[in-house]
Image: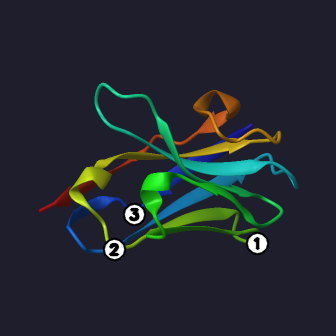
Amino acid sequence: QVQLVESGGGLVQAGDSLRLSCAASGRTFSNGVFGWFRQTPGKERELVAAIRWSGGSLSYADFVNGRFTISRDNAKMGVYLQMNSLKVEDTAVYYCAANRGFRYLSASDYEYWGQGTQVTVSS
């Protein structure tokens, strides 16, 4: 079992930056994928970015457009999402997710989820 705990969300103004953190604990694995998703009311969770635990980002959503960076720290069992130039439309609950396999594009590919952290961007 893997436990994921997100932190770092909050209320910011458009143009500001936030760094989300995801602390993983429990069963560790050398392979697999971590992803950041986000969700707004009435919409499905959408992938923001994904990274292989062994290294190397896999994917960024088109809406990221170079503003966000996903990274991981194997020693600390942490995955991070640096978000710059935030926009009002980035307002959502952000979730960290983990998958021991190789698929990463869909929320259904992920086995483990954190509880989510709210990001609110005001104009």
For the point 64% across and 27% down, the residue is: 108
Q: Amino acid at mark 1?
A: Ala
Q: Disc 1 versus disc 3: distance between alpha carbons? A: 20 Å
Determine which residue is flagged by label 3.
8
Horizontal side of 84 relative to 62 (left or right) equals left
Q: CA distance from mark 2 to mark 3?
A: 11 Å
The amino acid type of the residue labelled 3 equals Gly
> In the rendered image, which residue does mark 1 sit on?
75
Task: Please tell me whether mark 1 sits on a helix, a strand or a loop.
Answer: loop
In the rendered image, which residue does mark 2 sit on?
A: 17
**Element type at marker 3?**
loop
Within 10 Å of the Cα at label 2, are there few (<14), some (14-19), or many (20+) other Cα atoms?
A: some
First in sequence: mark 2 or mark 3?
A: 3
Q: Looking at this view, is 61 or 113 the one in front?
A: 61
* 55 over 102 or under it: above or below: below
Which tag, 2 or 1, sits closer to the chain's start?
2
Residue depicted at 76% across the width and 66% down the height:
56
Which is more N-terminal, label 3 or label 1?
Answer: 3
Determine the residue located farthest toward the right in the rendered image. 30
Asked if residue 14 lies left or right of residue 61, the reply is left
In what quadrant of the picture does the N terminus appear? top right
Q: Secondary structure at mark 2?
A: loop
Q: Give x and y (percent) for residue 74.
A: 76, 68
Question: Whole-Å distance between the Cαs marked 2 and 1?
Answer: 25 Å
Disc 1 packing (10 Å; few <14; some 14–19; many ≥20):
few
Residue 30: image tag = none
Image quadrant in which the C terminus is located? bottom left
Q: Is residue 97 left or right of residue 55?
A: left
